[in-house]
Amino acid sequence: MSLPTHEHLSVQTIPNAGRGAIANHHIPAGTTILSSAEPAAHVIFRQYRKEVCAHCFEYDRGRTLPVRDSETGKVFSSDRCREAWLSEHGVLGNEAWRALHVFVQSKSKAIARSSGALPSSSMKPSREVVERAWSKAEEQVRLYTWSQPMDDASRPPPARASNRTQAKSLSQPWTKHVDPNILSYFLSGVLFRSLHPNHWQKDVLCLAMDEEPYRSTEDLAAHCNSFVQLCTIVPGPLLESCTADVCRTLINAGSHNAFGIRSGSDDGEEYAGYALYPSASYFNHSCTPNILKRRVGGSWEFVTARDVDESEECCITYLGGDEKHLTVSERRARLSETWGFECICGRCLFEAGSGVMI
């Protein structure tokens, strides 16, 4: 799979930084160098489900938005946004979102059990534990799928779980805890994979993947549970895209490539969710960024903050502007905790004592 190219940028391998965006030529300050496509996957956190538009991500200072689709539970800033969202997802997508809404509404107690914070002492699971957990989840999905009424003569006969009652009892441990945020993120990505298979192959699978994205064994279990739950509720034609491989790709890609869905208000900025934008995921971080980013509806625009020289790396900040007021230790701690690296940008090296501003 070839790396993406743009008029102003090329994606190249950067020493000690994976891949990054390099200027193809001199770019004057104030130039829009990239406008991203719509996200390949996203989630609006459940606590913001009545306040953030499902289409354009508008947030009106905590007010409930005026247009609601009762069948999917989504809210919109206008009828135009609602119609665009419904058209975007098509008949199958709308059916899937309705099924998820009904499922989540029926699992209020399970959601309450899942709302507690993860134990801070819990360790990241080993790769062996991760593979075992996902294999177990895949087996559960196979058992459930085999138990359903057969509409495909080529499907193999069930090994176990010969009826719906058995399938229901088998799936009960997997529905004890329900995380609507993970379910929504998975479903949005599964729909993208189903509706845009070429873009999935060309754009999403090219991204750098975090092979250890789980913060704890509880976090791993929540994602495996969500995969099983989603497979039991999506319309049959979506099962081809609702696979463990697809869901694991969404997790691994989102861990290091997702952008926060943030909205300003009089009381500060609200972190309302996150989204995966493949075309915008090649900008590395700098604490003195030469690229500014701004969200325009459901997309992002990237504009040069100053003149950028030919062959210079184009960098954004991952700290949302907080880097202006944080010390080098504070910046590095936050970047390490959230993104898994220690910043060695010119500003950090200078402030850490090297005396050289790169």
Image (cartoon, helix red, strand yellow):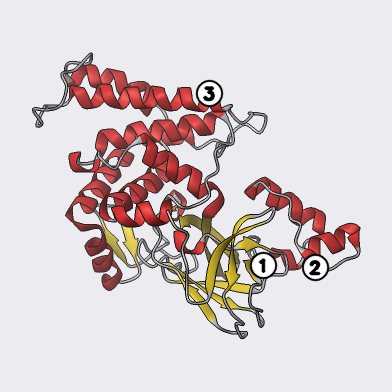
Query: Mark 2 or mark 1, which has the lower sequence index?
Result: 1
Element type at mark 2: loop
**Compared with residue 34, is residue 101 higher up or lower down, i.e. above or below?**
above
Q: Nearer the viewer, mark 1 or mark 3?
A: 3
Distance from disc 2 to disc 1, alpha carbons, whole Å, reads 20 Å
In the rendered image, the quadrant that contains the C terminus is bottom right
Q: Label 1, label 3: how many angstroms apart (C-alpha)?
A: 37 Å
Horizontally, residue 92 falls left or right of residue 352, namely left
Q: Which quadrant of the figure has residue 195?
A: bottom left
Q: Which mark is residue 321?
A: 1
In the rendered image, which residue does mark 2 sit on? Answer: 358
Identity, as a three-letter code, of the amino acid under mark 3? Val
Residue 73: x percent and y percent?
Answer: 30, 53
Write the residue at 10% across / 31% down: 152
Point 72% across, 69% down: residue: 288
- Figure check: 168 above or below 339: above
Looking at the image, residue 93 sits to the left or right of residue 282; the answer is left
